[in-house]
Amino acid sequence: MKKVILAAICILVLSSVAFAKYATYSLQVQIETTERHKIKDALVEIMVGNGFSINKDSEYQIAFDKEIENIFFMNLRTGQNAAARGVFTLAPSSNSITLSGIPLMISNPGTGFEIPSKITHRKDLRKFQEILFQVKSKVDGTPLEDLMATLPKIGSGERIFKSNQSHLSR
């Protein structure tokens, strides 16, 4: 019995250590400006350039949707594809704005029965963080290469959040 408990503890510890690098992976960035419209303009330019459309826009939040054309994410009963949704929140402070984002997959998008699920695939999370870094670079002039150097290395390939820009396909 002790061996079983010890084995279970080892598995929990090893899995938490392997995921710890990404569990604290912050999907936010501090931007040195007090003008929300500049951040929103940069977000719209980047997200629309990546094939997303605006789903919701308010003073402190903006959301973008993009249809996922994959039969595995399709609602087989209705034939409706799922959607990737990026929800961005702008939280102002005295001399900067914190831009945070949540990547979601939405089943039954645009209906009263939407089912949101967090996207946890590491490559998609990295792509989402890259989008936040692009916005920071455009708005406050921080070199994009310096920001990208802070991201963990997780391999090549991209998933839902694809970029048309060659400098992001590392």
Image: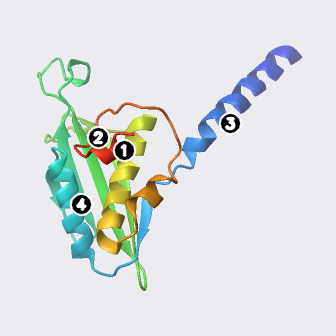
Q: Nearer the viewer, residue 118 or 48?
A: 48
Q: Assess whether mark 3 and mark 1 are in contact (beta carbons under 8 angstroms).
A: no
Left/right of residue 169 with respect to residue 121 in the rendered view:
left
Q: Amino acid at mark 4?
A: Leu
Q: Nearer the viewer, residue 145 or 12?
A: 145
Query: Sequence order check: which comes first, mark 2 or mark 4?
Result: 4
Query: Sequence order check: which comes first, mark 1 or mark 4?
Result: 4
Residue extending farthest bottom: 94
Which residue is identified by label 3? 17
Spatial separation of the CA atoms under disc 1 and disc 4: 14 Å
Report x, y in % for residue 168.
34, 45
Secondary element type, mark 4: helix
Q: Assess whether mark 1 and mark 2 are in contact (beta carbons under 8 angstroms).
A: yes
Quarter holding the C terminus? top left
Q: Residue at x 15, y 44 (%)?
A: 51
Spatial separation of the CA atoms under disc 1 and disc 3: 22 Å
Vertical comparison of 34 with 44: above or below? below
Left/right of residue 37 with respect to residue 31 in the rendered view:
left
Q: Assess whether mark 4 and mark 2 are in contact (beta carbons under 8 angstroms).
A: no
Secondary element type, mark 3: helix
Vertical comparison of 8 with 22: above or below? above
Q: Residue at x 37, y 39 (%)?
A: 124
Q: Give the foreground label among 2 and 3.
A: 2
Q: Assess whether mark 3 and mark 2 are in contact (beta carbons under 8 angstroms).
A: no
- Give the numbered dot on residue 127: 1
Using a 10 Å C-alpha cutoff, classify the residue at mark 2 as few (fewer than 14 neighbours), some (14 to 19) or many (20 or more). Answer: many
Using the rendered view, name the quadrant where residue 30 is placed.
bottom left
Report x, y in % for residue 12.
70, 29
- Give the numbered dot on residue 161: 2
Q: Residue at x 50, y 49 (%)?
A: 151
Which residue is identified by label 4? 43
Q: Residue at x 13, y 27 (%)?
A: 80
